Image (cartoon, grey):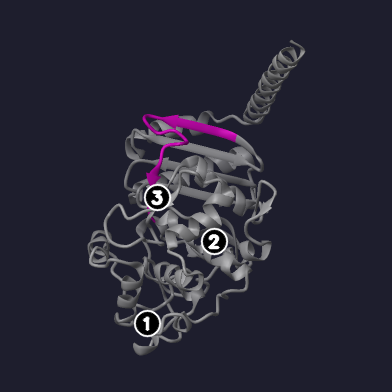
Amino acid sequence: MRTRNATMSYKVSLICLKVISLSLFLLVFQSARAQYDWTALQAELEARQQQLGKDIVVLIRKDDSLVFKKEIGQFNTKTQAPIASSSKWLTAALVMQFVDEGKLSLDTKVVDYIPEFGKYFKSYITIGDCLSHMTGIDDDDKFLKRILERKKYESLEEEVNALARKEIRANRGTDFWYGGVGLNIAGRVLEIVSKKKFDMLIKQKLFVPLGLTRSSFTNLNGGPINPSGGAQSTADDYMKFLQMLFQKGKYNGKQILSEDAVEEMLKVRTKNIPIRYAPKSATGYGYASGAWVLEEKDGVATAIASPGLFGCWPMIDYCRGYTYLVFVKNLLGEERADIHKTLKTIIDEQLTSKCQ
């Protein structure tokens, strides 16, 4: 009888503890949100819903606190969706984990792992060139054409060997051409170094440590795994990744990336480099490693984003101290990019009026 009573008492105490913990969380969450007036942001989202689409999730975290959350239509923070080029930021972070471990450096030459590049006079291309779209290898700026071309290949190895045989557009490091070439080459190098397929590798080293339970790299469009644009994720998952970068590589007490690696990812790579091709939505921005530079100081990004064609818009503003993420179920057109600039201006004014 005593044992039964003790068990019941323990269960009641556990339930009470959970209720108290939930109440405290809600109290802190409501308190954090109460500091800000999001009326203008709400109004802008409603006014722009036709352009953004009927399914939208918006999250904003200021330092460690969630200060804004909006779910519209069928989307919620756990809805999985393709994130297109927002995948590049994930792949760049995975590369930097290998740099942290001393297995690669940004000066490592691709030919050291893929001899095919030496056969076709591309032995000078480095991992750093790959992360910043400066390989000089010819690429197509037509999205659908790139998708159809990738379907010809059965593996990332086959695709990257074909890239080695492509024409040279420019000498490495002399101009910037945005696309999928560089990140896919880097992804293949990681496969060779680790002796693991890219999708399993990024799950093991990045997704599992961060608790990204609904994120994966798949080949929905056919063809091989695509490190430069083939991830699916959720708003909850991707926000964890943003928080890790915002917190100098640390998440939930674990150092996922070194501070040096995060700082390296923030360096502007396109200083004094001509931008030969960039999507219209990124006109006027510089580029770092896997992400666009919205604002910078002394060659280091202070606000950085990695938007995807399918509507994912993740952004970190280090200077103002917040992370921002929009998931929409729509293609990202030029006008929608302008919307995100407007939304950022509203957020900046609410969180802090000036960034020193």
- Which amino acid type is shown beneath numbered disc 1? Ala
Query: Marks 2 and 1, how far apart in space?
Result: 26 Å
Along the line of sight, the residue nearer the viewer: 212 or 344: 212
Q: Position of residue 272 (x, y in %)?
A: 51, 75
Q: Is residue 288 visible?
A: no
Element at label 2: helix
Q: Residues within 10 Å of mark 1 (few under 14, many from 20)?
A: some
| Total count of labels | 3
Q: Is disc 3 placed on a helix, strand or loop?
A: loop
Identify residue type, mark 3: Ile
Q: Which residue: 42% across, 77% down?
A: 135
Which residue is pictured at 37% across the width and 30% down the height?
A: 74
Give the residue pinned by disc 2. Answer: 93
Residue beneath label 3, please?
Answer: 83
**Counting other residues with Cα less than 10 Å from the Cα at mark 3, is it few (<14), some (14-19), or many (20 or more)?**
many
Q: What stretch is highlighted in magenta?
A: 67-84
| Three-letter code, disc 2 | Ala
